[in-house]
Amino acid sequence: MFARITQFKMKPGMRDAAEARMNELKDQIMGMEGMHSFTNVMNEDGSGFVVAVVQSEELSNANAPKVTELWGQFAEFLEGPPAPAGFDVVVHWDKG
């Protein structure tokens, strides 16, 4: 498995609107090939991370155009472009 971890920063006062948009896009996000899990964490100041766990780095890379399109849906809410980084998953535990 492979994890794409993306740091972002929302503009002040945009958290609720961004969260609503994210929920609207859930099916598209979770429908990307190889997607195992998606977690978005954000502090009150709008700083946060997205952790997307995918079957493989190859699938993560193949999803890149769709990911870029989806991040584009958040452009009006973001202070700047998101900063992704990729990692091999050592363990992935999920009780849910």
Image (cartoon, rainbow, N blue to C red):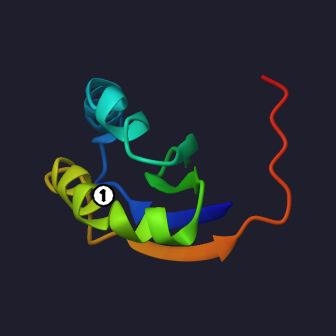
Residue 59 percent location from the top left of the image:
46, 62
For the point 28% across and 42% down, the residue is 14
Task: Give above or below for 19 relative to 92.
Answer: above
Image position, residue 73 (x, y; %): 17, 47
Q: Name the quadrant of the N terminus.
A: bottom right
Res. 84 visible in picture: yes
The spot of residue 57 in percent (x, y) is 54, 71
Q: Quadrant of residue 78?
A: bottom left
> Dot 1 corresponds to which residue?
67
Which residue is nearer to you in this view: 69 or 40? 69
Q: Does residue 7 appear in this view?
A: no
Snapshot quadrant of residue 94:
top right
Nearest the viewer among 28 and 75 is 28
Q: Quadrant of residue 81?
A: bottom left
Left or right, 95 with reference to 39: right
**In screen coordinates, is 27 left or right of 71?**
right
